[in-house]
Amino acid sequence: MSYCDGWCTTQADQKYHDTEWGFPVHNDRKLFEFLMLEVLQCGLSWQLVIKKRAIFRTCFDKFDYTKIAAYGAQDIQRILNTPGMIRSERKIKAIIQNARAFLRVRKDFGSFSKFLWSYSEGKSIIYAGHARGAVPTANGLSTQISRELKARGFTFLGPVTIYSYLQSCGVINDHDFTCPLFKKISQQYSCITKKRDQEVF
């Protein structure tokens, strides 16, 4: 069983893995959605997040960061009262705060995509050993990006959470080498190979 097979335990997981996870994302709306899914996942299983993804999209205007940045107390209460929603006021407030910080990054860099992908020169990173299962929970890159995002006003985004995010949006290609998508992404997208993952910035 490969690393990827190990977490594809449901049909929804499999679809997410086969069509989204690890594919390079440059669209800001989707980058924001992926980032906020990581916020919502903190302390919960990823399977639950995938299961409730449609509810999250309804609650947060399909993750339109411009609309979310304007949310107030009534929106927080609306979201908390939505059937099936994770009832965490701290996470809801974090998403609103992060939407506002996201807009500031777009203003400074032109897009969040430009900011994020500048850390890898616009290429997906393949770390030696990861494809054979030696996958860390965080690394030098995720630590640096987490630190930068926190300095820019983001919250709920520590190095472990950011590492998971970098995997999901394709900045890091962490598909197992036995997974067909490892080869597909490696061949169809610009990639860079690194021998170690404790980068010093």
Image (cartoon, rainbow, N blue to C red):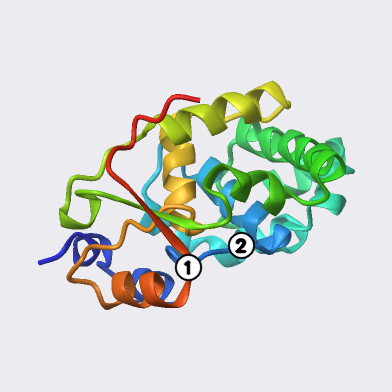
Q: Position of residue 53 (x, y in %)?
A: 55, 62
Query: Does residue 107 show up?
Result: yes
Which residue, given by chain and number where applicable, does mark 1 sit on?
A: 23
Q: Is residue 83 left or right of residue 98?
A: left
Residue 15 image-quadrant placement: bottom left
Q: Position of residue 94 (x, y in %)?
A: 67, 33
Q: Amino acid at mark 2?
A: Ile
Of label 2 and label 1, which has the lower sequence position? 1
Q: Position of residue 25 (x, y in %)?
A: 58, 63
Callout 2 touching callout 1 (CB < 8 Å):
no
Residue at figure coordinates x 63%, y 27% from the top left:
148
Query: Does residue 12 show up?
Result: no
Q: Where is 95 relative to 48, above or below?
A: above
Tell me the quadrant of the picture where the N terminus can be found. Answer: bottom left
Give 178 or 66, whichever is nearer the viewer: 178
Q: Amino acid at mark 1?
A: Phe
Q: Residues within 10 Å of mark 1 (few under 14, many from 20)?
A: many
Residue lying at the far left of the rendered structure: 1
**Disc 2 and disc 1: Cα gap in Å?**
23 Å
Residue at figure coordinates x 26%, y 60% from the top left:
7
- Residue 55 bears which disc, if any? 2
